[in-house]
Amino acid sequence: MSRKFNTLENKLGDKKINLNEEVEKILLDQGAISVGFATKKTLEGGPPTTDMTYILPEAETAICFAVPLDKPKIRSFLGKELPRGHFDHVIDNGNVYLKAYKYAKVTSDFLEEKGYKSAPVINNFKYREDVQNWRTKLPPPLALRLVAARSGVGSIGWSGNILVKGYGAAVLLGALVTSAKLKPTESIPPEESPCDKCKLCVNVCAYRMFDKNEEDSYTLGENTFSFSKRNNVSRCYTVCGGSSGLDKTKKWSTWSPGRTPYPEKEIDADKTFAHLFSHPIKNSRVVGEEGSYAESELLHDKVAQEYISSGEIASNTITENFTLTCGNCQLICWGDHDETVENYRILTNSGCIVTKENGENIIVSKEEADELEKSGKIADPYVETSERRQYVENIVVDIFKKLRKEQA
Ligand code: SF4
Ligand code: SF4
């Protein structure tokens, strides 16, 4: 199938359309901006997480699509604007996960009515629980980024996120699988990728999860996709998980009040994660911020509830307490060099969150944070320890040690 049906601009009119086109139209009409089709053959040679039969034994085609995030809300989030910069984006991001699931469900129901077995894919917070140490590896039911790259929904950027022309990485992915044998779409040639290798995604990761020079790659159905080598996933688990957010440079932070020093070595990254895992932050609310995911109307939607109750991790994640403190590698990259540079400038000038002695979290400049630190006026939320906490910490470090040995 040619790529001409893959974008919104080429949305079809009234002419007679085939099943690929019908499916694409259903997704675009709901709000998707790019749609691709991958088959077992085009995904051949990929890692186990590209096996679509894990979700549906009869699956022949995976249909993947992108849904855009709200860019002005991303800017306010990156700039740590008060009062709504944090939660306006959190609400949008949570809602886009739910919308993507809904789009997949509607399309899956359509295909079921046509007589094909189909199933929507849970697009985040659900993992393959039959994989050993799944809680550490977090293997998704289907590797949406690889399916999206192979089917031409977008291009894999240096960060490993999917970039869609005109939107950059400011999108979330959704998918469904079906027994219908649909025509696969081609991947986007590397020379047409919106990723210009500016590598700003490397520097907006507070714990530097991505290598600046070394590459990794996957080959699927004879197409190879390259992106940065991951240094250690525990770096992202710590920062994206909200346990710490102070950047390596100490000039800015994410929305997390955690200020644990940058781990230089990989073993330090594991130890930091383990320590913070056993010392969860009790109060991450920032003085002056307003909003919460409880405001989301979608949260109470019937189909969204199906998504929410679909798995152990999912059910604990998208709740009224849903929050995000990072996502920077994805959020800054808008597929346009000047816009991405501007996002980088906004984030790196947004200041740091610190916890005062009275437990309040406030946003201050680097200079103010240094001053407070020098005079001992920043609280350390991690001093408290106990035998039980130490026990948990040791177990987590051991699990990561084994995982890294396995990966080596
Ligand atoms: S920020 Fe975006 S465009 Fe720049 S290297 Fe990273 S993925 Fe590529
Ligand atoms: S989400 Fe945040 S912590 Fe995770 S890799 Fe991206 S920038 Fe780093």
Image (tube, rainbow, N blue to C red):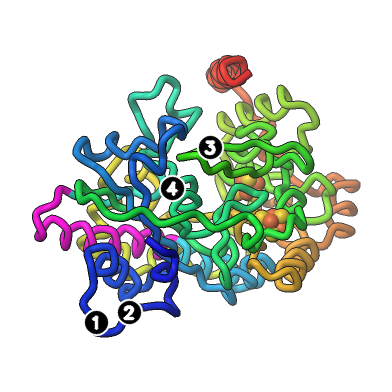
Are circles 2 and 1 on residues that touch, CB within 8 Å?
A: yes
Disc ID at residue 12:
2
Q: Earlier in the sequence, mark 4 or mark 2?
A: 2
Residue 388, image x, y percentages: 53, 18
**Up-down relation of residue 385 to residue 181 (above or below):** above
Q: Earlier in the sequence, mark 4 or mark 3?
A: 4
Residue 41, image x, y percentages: 36, 40
Are circles 4 and 1 on residues that touch, CB within 8 Å?
A: no
Question: Residue 276 appears in which quarter of the rendering?
Answer: top right
Question: Which of labels 2 and 1 is toward the front?
Answer: 1
Q: Earlier in the sequence, mark 4 or mark 1?
A: 1
Residue picked out by circle 4: 147
Q: Amino acid at mark 3?
A: Thr
CA–CA distance in space, label 4 to label 3: 11 Å
Q: Main secondary structure of the magenta part?
A: helix
Q: Amino acid at mark 2?
A: Leu
**Stretch of the chain drawn in magenta:** 94-117
CA–CA distance in space, label 3 to label 2: 32 Å
Q: Secondary structure at mark 1?
A: loop
Residue picked out by circle 1: 15
Residue picked out by circle 3: 219
